[in-house]
Amino acid sequence: MFENDGIKQVKNFLSEESINNINSEIEEISNKYLINGVTRASTWINKNLYDISNPIVNINKENLLEIALDINKIISKETSKKYLLSAVRIIVEKKNSNPLGWHTDHFPDTIRGIIYIMGGENGDGSLGYIKGSHKNNHDKKIHKINPKEANLENQIENIDSKPGDLIFFNTNGFHKKNTVIRERRILFFEFQDIKSAKKRHQIILDNSKISSKILENINFLFTNENKTNLIAPPFSDHIPDYTPVKLFLFYIKTFLKILIRRIFKKFSF
């Protein structure tokens, strides 16, 4: 049971058609970068990792809000609490030999759902989880652990996933992301207990995605509380380490286009 283990996998949650639709849009958007008001773009966080900006708005072939709602309904059946959607991201990671080690996020009232669009197999960005560790009241000074030293090795589950699989887990439990040999693409959703005191992320919506299905279940997005102090979506406020050369080429090309256009406009009659 999810409440005992803290984690659950749902095989083939997304169809092959949906996976292909999302991947095709990621391919298109990944070659565009934030500049001069453009919002249908990707944001690089480091040399291996980037996000698709405002995914609910920018992914059009599939309705990510409806996907989030379907996950929320599954979570509701597995728990006795009501959860609100608190974050949506699309994360792409390539060839990263540095795994994200065993750690807790210290949020017992938050459930994270990830759907693999690419990768997820053992050795290619798979997830590890220590079953039952979500029920512990972890020392706030402890973030990373060594399962062997903590005598938790027998509770480790390494989850082999395929594109289309959904995993949702309590982020208070110890978890890790394994090495990405090729490429890992995930839809990333977080859901918070409606009674949680933790700040929720700002989610940029698109009114064209508010379908009748969403309207019938609109409470999974909002509360009656007038909370305006939300956390902004993830962004990088500096040039990432080892920025890919293609980003610099893109910006130089764009700058030259703008410069030439202005010169031409100035001297044209």
Image: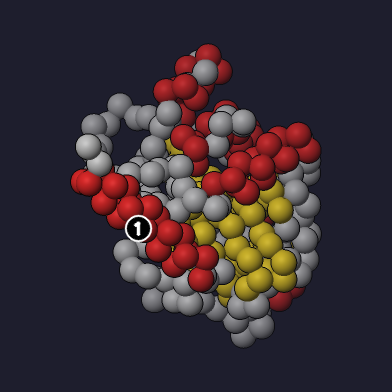
**Most foreground residue, 256 or 139:** 256
Q: Measuring 77% from the left and 61% from the top, which residue is drawn there?
A: 121
Q: Place residue 76 in its image quadrant.
A: top right
Is 194 on the left or on the right of 168, as rendered?
left
Q: Position of residue 184 (x, y in %)?
A: 66, 59
**Most foreground residue, 99 or 113:** 99
Question: Residue farthest to the front?
Answer: 269
Count neighbours of disc 1 (C-alpha within 10 A) and say few if under 14, some if 14 to 19, many if 20 or more: some
Q: Quadrant of the C terminus?
A: top left
**Most foreground residue, 38 or 16:** 38
Q: Measuring 36% from the left and 58% from the top, which residue is drawn there?
A: 256
Q: Position of residue 147 (x, y in %)?
A: 63, 78
Q: Measuring 30% from the left and 27% from the top, which residue is drawn there?
A: 224
> Is residue 253 positioned above or below 26 on the image?
below
Q: Is residue 156 visible?
A: no
> Is residue 168 positioned above or below 76 on the image?
below
SS for callout 1: helix
Q: Measuring 38% from the left and 44% from the top, which residue is drawn there?
A: 38
Q: Position of residue 220 (x, y in %)?
A: 46, 29
Residue located beneath label 1 in the image:
255
Q: Is residue 5 visible?
A: yes
Question: Residue farthest to the bottom?
Answer: 149
Is 220 on the left or on the right of 113, as rendered?
left
